[in-house]
Image: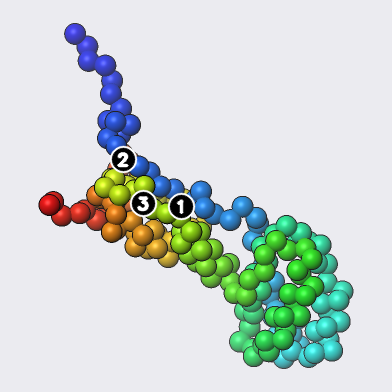
Amino acid sequence: MEQPIVNRVAVSGLITLNLEEYFPQAELKAFDLKDFLFMEMILKEKDFRAALKEHDWAQYEGKVLHVFCSADAIIPVWAYMLVTTYAQPFAQDIFQGTAEEYLKVHYREVLESIDFAEYADKRIVIKGCSNKPVPAAAYMILTTKLRPLAKSIMYGEPCSTVPIFKQPRK
């Protein structure tokens, strides 16, 4: 007699967590102050104000704007504040730093807001191979949150995992 095919992953009791589900919904847009500097080195207030006034701010409608300077220049704090005054009516969120820095902060905020109690004594697989740039810091934060609770933590796909942590037997 032929045995029925059993999906061992489906009946294993593994819970898969996918950090991509918490990726920001809004598009990230860069605003590099370097483009507004004289010789990519000096911020001239009068020229800077004029350039900001002429800039097309509508392109940031509903987006997350991350403001940074890729040039090795000293940028006064008021310059970031001035950009914010122009961008705020359009951008969904405004962040000072790179996209990578924004994602680290975003994931920290999201993961801090989750009650992980439901994962107590569970076997967890943190999904790998994401299609979006989920920062390594997010995986570290999630592991920190799960370690005191979970029976085990693995990384990868349910059919092929890397063991990360296992509670000692009591």
Q: Which mark is residue 117?
A: 3
Image coords of residue 72 (percent x, y)? 61, 87
Image quadrant of residue 93? Answer: bottom right
| Residue 6 can be seen in this image | yes
Residue at screen point 28% across, 23% down: 6
Q: Which amino acid, mark 2? A: Leu
Which residue position holds label 2? 14
Q: Is residue 131 above or below residue 48?
A: above
Residue at screen point 83% across, 79% down: 51
Image coords of residue 89 (percent x, y)? 79, 66
* Structural crowding at the residue carrying mark 1, measured as other residues with C-alpha within 10 Å and reported as few (<14), some (14–19) or many (≥20): some
Mark whose residue sits in front, 3 or 1: 3
* Structural crowding at the residue carrying mark 3, measured as other residues with C-alpha within 10 Å and reported as few (<14), some (14–19) or many (≥20): few
Which residue position holds label 1? 19
Q: Is residue 67 above or below residue 152?
A: below
Q: Which amino acid, mark 3? A: Ala
**Along the polypeptide, which appears first: circle 2 or circle 1?**
2
Image quadrant of residue 165? Answer: bottom left
Image coords of residue 39 (percent x, y)? 73, 88
